Amino acid sequence: MGIGMLLFWGLIIAAIVMLVRGFAGGSSAAGPNAGNKTALDILRERYAKGEIDKPEFEQKRRDLDAR
């Protein structure tokens, strides 16, 4: 009975740790190359998501190309 209770609580604690790590690790959409994105990549993503419209995208792209 004592070993069963120890295993039970061990599994509960392990599940909680896995959940916390999953939420703390960020979104799964970020992917392994999330840190290697250029400003233009981020701009394209924002345009694809609809966060910015075409004129704003074009202006910001020109600003980035000027650098």
Image (cartoon, rainbow, N blue to C red):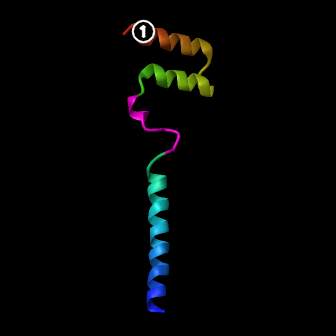
Q: How many marks?
A: 1
Figure check: 61 above or below 35? above
Q: Residue placed farthest to the bottom in the image? A: 1
Nearer the observer, 31 or 43: 31
Tell me if residue 28 is in the magenta stretch.
Answer: yes
Between residue 60 and residue 27, name the one nearer to us: 27
27 up-or-down from 10: above or below: above
Return the x and y of residue 40 as percentages of the image width and height: 46, 19
Q: Secondary structure at mark 1?
A: helix
Q: Nearer the viewer, residue 41 or 6?
A: 6
Picture quadrant of residue 46: top right
Query: Quick one: quadrant of the C terminus?
Result: top left
Q: Where is residue 58 shown, x and y percent of the image?
A: 54, 11
- Magenta range: 27-36
User: Dominant secondary structure of the magenta stretch?
Assistant: loop
x and y, in percent, of residue 44 in the image: 53, 21
Q: Inspect the magenta stretch and tell me whether residue 33 lies in it.
A: yes
Q: Name the residue at 49% across, 73% down.
A: 12
Residue at 41% over, 23% down:
38
Q: Residue at x 48, y 54 (%)?
A: 22
The residue under label 1 is 65
Q: Is residue 52 above or below residue 3?
A: above
Question: Three-letter amino acid code at disc 1?
Answer: Asp
When the figure is inspected, residue 17 is found, relative to residue 63, above or below; the finding is below
Compared across the picture, whether 49 is left or right of 20 comes to: right
Residue at the farthest left position: 67
Q: Residue at x 50, y 80 (%)?
A: 8
Answer with the quarter of the image where residue 47 lies. Answer: top right
Mark 1 neighbour density, 10 Å: few (under 14) some (14–19) many (20 or more): few
